Image (tube, rainbow, N blue to C red):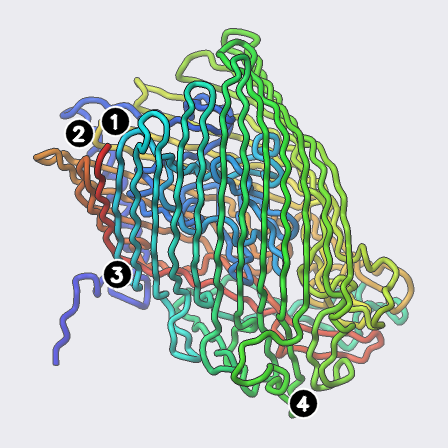
Amino acid sequence: MEVERSAWDGLRGPVGRGPLSAAAWRGALACVLLGAAPLASAVAQEEGVGEIAEIVVTTRNRAENLQDVPIAVDAISDEELQRKGINSVADVLSESSSLILDQGISPQDVRVVVRGLSPTRGRPNVAFLQDGIDISSESVASAGSSLLSSQRLFELERVEVVKGPQSALYGRSAFNGAINYITRRPGDSFRSTVSGEAGSGGVYQATGSVSGPVLPDVLNLGLNAATWSEDGYYTNAVTGAPVGGTEGYGVAGSAVLDLGEASSFYLRVEYTDDESDSPAVASSNKRRRFDIPAGAILPFPDTVISPNIITARVPTGKPLPASEYAVRLSADPRTGEEYPGSDRQIFRTSLIADFDLGVVTLKSLTHYADADTFQFLDGQRVGSAVGSIAYGELNADTSTTLFTQELRVSSVGDGPWRWTTGALWWNEDVEQVNASYSCFVPDTFPETCDTYIGAIGTTEASNPLYWTRDTEHWSVYAQVDWQFADAWRLGVEARYSWEDLQLVGPDGSLIIDPAGLLGGGVVTVPPPTNPFPVSDKDNFFAGKATLTWQPYDEQLYYFSLAQAVKPSGVSTVGAGLTGLDPTPGEDLPGDEDFFRFDQERMLVYELGAKTRWFDDRVQVNGALFYQDFSDKQTDSQVSLPNGLVGIKPVNAGKAEVLGAELEVTWQPVDTLSVSASYSWLDTEYSDFTRETAGVNDIAAAGNCTPSGPAFPDRVCTIDLSGRELERAPEHSFNGSLTHRAPLENGWSWLTEFAGRYEDSRYDSVFNTLQFDDYWMFDLRMGVQTDTWDVIGYVENLTDDDTIRSGFTSPDLKTAATDAGPPFTFILLNSAFYNMPDPRTIGVRATFRFGE
């Protein structure tokens, strides 16, 4: 029987999946985009000249034209959010050539890379804010940000993405940038919207909002809600079930109370509940052999690694296209069903109060959030756990409460002096039950991990480890802007912070060793029932000075010098806080400091320009910056007291980033706009040495200077100076062409092409595993009116399946030991790749009522 095929079936590219190759697609699209210039010129002759719309932002805590702000800022309007279907953090970041979102080992391991800086350890580099309130959080059992930031966005007025150090303006987490979601306040006129989306891959989304006056000129109320679902684009080869899907809903209510010119209040209450399947992650054991450097195998007792080990295999090179890999995730051996994945419920409320006191204004920002997140995933990702000699699980149940209070006093008027001063109290309490574990059995033993997985028929955690973390932050800040000449301004910002971190965690970590590598049976080293407290106190100053020259209204030039500080802390990633102390109840010297890391400091020089030309038809913005690090926070493998290898945070000496950004917007006529942004980075660890006893790290470094006391505490000092910073592409580009053709009855036809390029980048500081460069294209076409839009879209138009991100993690089935001397434990890494979304096709519709 002949089966009907849609017109899209023959357009599946890339190579190997359809008649058109990726190169052919890209060439065709390039012709279309390059042909836009004569098209634009012809339209200009027929229809006249248009101007680029003015964008108002509150980046510096006051309403300003985006082009008058001496800071590198990307603003996304509500119209653009709806048109492009931007509803997640990943979507927001994809709009900027300077930002990248990386997904790490678990859904809670979310890392934002800004201007080439990736948060390997410690606090995130970028602050997440909602209406100017810091809602950032740090993960406990993994690196990166936690799940407190909104993954689904609805009823927003705009999103502001600020690049570069902004600690004085945005608080404790804005080490190198900030993302501020500005929610829409209910106005004094009735307004309502209803929108929906349906697409391939089981994508469905519906949102609705209504707002308006209840007591005219006094009280306005608003309500908005959203629901969404997605089936996922990949199938688990082990179980046959789809993976990577998500579903959830959210609801928010808001109120604006206006008591005249003296005071106003904005109250917002929201709740979100979403569930996600296990992420679509594929594994690869493709490795290359690296020789063990001679310095690591000197004659005993100066030996660091057993002389019997002469090479180590390390993930290297670039991954193949995603079509060459299969997702192989185990079902939960207890139930035979898929692992639950992740689940998140967040309740959040905020109150913003504004008071006009005549000579000054006072703003109060109060925020409370209560979040429960749960993750239960296959930790090995290589196949079924049943009968396996190597298996691991990620199992973490986390409860987080966050309370912040900020008071801000600002000057009034437009005189030569403008200033703001304030104080912030930020307090976060985290409780986590972590039942993650690892099991490994050498293939020379008949045992498997089945006995140690847990009781069949239950999903309750086995051998739970308990963590609590209480972070209290106090800071005071000030901002002064002085116009000392007609075209010149000097701005100074400063914040002084105090932090107190109290951490209580297990004094060991669960290792299951049925084969006897560590003595046989189920070994807990030491029993995880002994809480181990660690405290960390820190205080630091972060400041910024900006000199602005604005010779004309259409041209602004600035130079800024900023000192950024990321505070010290204690890492909770890896083993227990004592580094697997083999003597239960007896702490080793220095145990409390084993997982502590110091401050990271960065001095940033930036020269920028914001200009408009040809009667505001062309807008050109740019920035040249140099980032000078000292003590960059990263991680290292170390030899633990029981002979195993663990992960420990370290500070990496010096690193440098030289970069440039260029943004161009051209609107030749009202109906056509062209925009492009480009980023260039040159990164290097200029002075980076660290100690390690890990076989993989020593081999990948290719050098070793033995250090430390006499055997058995010998380690290598490895030198990684000259290597590129991890996850930092040299070139990135974003571009779009949007054309609106007027039709009859107030209708218009929309056509929009968008493209993104990202250069290759390394996975880690060792510069071995590398993600390939790629192009991504989107197409949107539809009809728009003043009251409704219907837009069809094709995302990833060429069906590019380049692997864009991933991570390395231990491959437990490679666990082995060599008696030495010295005793050496070997555990090789595998590469794990986040599978990219294929081409997706769908339609979005929005209907507006009222104003």
Per the model, the C-alpha gap separating discs 1 and 3 is 34 Å
Marks 1, 3: nearer the viewer: 1
Horizontal and vertical percent for residue 46?
A: 14, 25
Q: Which residue is mark 1?
A: 668
Task: First in sequence, mark 1 or 2: give its number.
Answer: 2
Residue contact between numbered discs 1 and 3, judged by CB atoms under 8 Å: no
The dot on residue 444 is 4
The dot on residue 20 is 3
Q: State the residue at coordinates (30%, 49%).
A: 207
Residue contact between numbered discs 2 and 4, judged by CB atoms under 8 Å: no
603 left or right of 840?
Answer: right
Marks 3, 2: nearer the viewer: 2
Quadrant location of the C terminus? top left
Per the model, the C-alpha gap separating discs 1 and 4 is 72 Å
Q: Is residue 838 above or below residue 256?
A: below
Quadrant location of the N terminus? bottom left
- SS at mark 2? helix
Q: Which residue is mark 2?
A: 43
Per the model, the C-alpha gap separating discs 2 and 4 is 75 Å
Residue contact between numbered discs 3 and 4, judged by CB atoms under 8 Å: no
Horizontal and vertical percent for residue 368?
A: 54, 44
Between 716 and 408, the residue placed more toward the observer is 408
Q: Quadrant of residue 426?
A: top right
For badge 4, the amino acid type reads Thr
Task: First in sequence, mark 1 or 3: give its number.
Answer: 3
Residue contact between numbered discs 1 and 2, judged by CB atoms under 8 Å: yes
Horizontal and vertical percent for residue 761?
A: 53, 52
Q: Is residue 687 visible?
A: no
Q: Is residue 109 above or below residue 569?
A: below
